[in-house]
């Protein structure tokens, strides 16, 4: 495959909401060093708004290191299992920290292992992605137990706990008033609205960055012009993940056909392939 078809694959655009989330994470991380006060932070947004990208990009700036005392893992990223339960969360932490037998042991045994591993690796922040699984796929009993466990984890480890997920993730935090008090105000990553001037401008700015990269290899309409930006917004409902899919498939088609021009029809075809929403809209805003 032509390398030019992968232009948008690894692009990470630090738009305003992304930067705000990163700054809050950095502040939490800095103050976690003294372990004086336990706190949590929730990053909330609809699917495709960049929650996972925010977590992984921040984690990449504080990578694990090996010292004479062993491996140090300042930030731990954990994806909440599809079958959510405290034992599965404990197992996921043990697995991500590279320890063996993550699936074995009672909940109490796993808890002791988790706390030892977190202490020995100098952990300062634990990120739980797809946190809504505890609400959407678990029972109320599991959710209550998980909220109680999370409160204890914050208090016992003094690590900053970051959770990311769909809006329903907030229900888990709000289930336990003591847990809720330990959390800062949530950060919301938006689906960009065309009717909010700041968000519309932000969406156009993102399109301009994509256009600048694509235009180095392909001749294409200005993606960030008002008419084109509106068409992309209608097609994606303001979700950057959907936008990336459309651009990716348009680039692949042009690369496969050995073309250096991408036209409106290519974007329309890419939209039909990559995003199963409404038909590609027509008309001006």
Image (cartoon, rainbow, N blue to C red):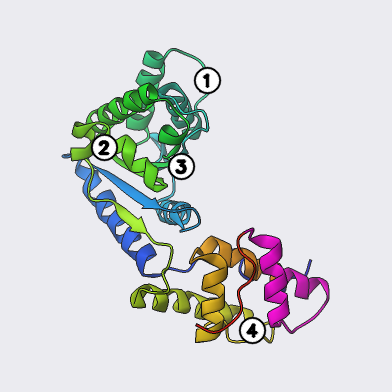
The span from disc 1 to disc 3 (Cα, nearest Å) is: 20 Å
Q: Nearer the viewer, mark 2 or mark 4?
A: 2
For the residue labelled by badge 4, is the local secondary structure a helix, a strand or a loop?
Answer: loop
Q: Say which mark, if any, is on residue 103.
A: 1
Residue 237, which numbered label?
none
The picture places residue 245, in percent across and down from the top left corner, at 62, 63
What's the residue at 21%, 49% (across, down)? Answer: 31
Q: CA distance from mark 2 to mark 3?
A: 17 Å
Q: Is residue 236 magenta?
A: no
Residue stretch rendered in magenta on the structure: 251-276
Q: Earlier in the sequence, mark 3 or mark 4?
A: 3
Q: Mark 2 or mark 1: name the one nearer the start of the chain.
A: 1
The label shown at residue 216 is 4
Mark 4 vs 1, N-terminal side: 1
Estimate the x, y position of residue 263 in percent, counting from the top left.
71, 83
Q: Earlier in the sequence, mark 1 or mark 3?
A: 1
């Amino acid at each position: 495959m032509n390398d030019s078809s992968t232009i948008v694959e690894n692009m990470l655009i630090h738009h305003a909401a992304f930067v705000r989330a990163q700054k809050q994470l950095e502040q939490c991380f800095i103050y976690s060093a003294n372990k004086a006060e336990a706190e949590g932070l929730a990053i909330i947004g609809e699917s495709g708004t960049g929650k996972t990208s925010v977590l992984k990009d921040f984690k990449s700036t504080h990578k694990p290191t090996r010292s004479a005392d062993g491996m140090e893992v300042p930030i731990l990223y954990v994806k909440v299992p599809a079958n959510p339960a405290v034992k599965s969360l404990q197992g996921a932490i043990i697995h991500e920290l590279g320890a063996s037998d993550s699936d074995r042991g009672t909940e109490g045994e796993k808890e002791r292992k988790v706390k030892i591993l977190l202490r020995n690796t100098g952990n300062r922040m634990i990120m739980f992605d797809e946190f809504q699984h505890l609400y959407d796929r678990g029972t109320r009993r599991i959710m209550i137990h998980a909220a109680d466990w999370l409160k204890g984890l914050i208090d016992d480890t003094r690590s900053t706990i970051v959770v990311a997920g769909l809006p329903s993730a907030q229900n888990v935090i709000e289930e336990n008033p003591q847990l809720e008090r330990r959390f800062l105000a949530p950060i919301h990553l938006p689906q960009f609205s065309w009717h909010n001037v700041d968000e519309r401008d932000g969406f156009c700015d993102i399109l301009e960055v994509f256009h600048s990269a694509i235009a180095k290899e392909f001749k294409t309409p200005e993606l960030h012009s008002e008419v084109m930006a509106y068409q992309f917004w209608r097609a994606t409902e303001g979700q950057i993940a959907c936008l990336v899919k459309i651009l990716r498939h348009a680039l692949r088609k042009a690369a496969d056909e050995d073309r250096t021009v991408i036209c409106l029809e290519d974007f329309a075809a890419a939209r039909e392939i990559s995003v199963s929403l409404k038909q590609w809209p027509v008309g001006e805003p």
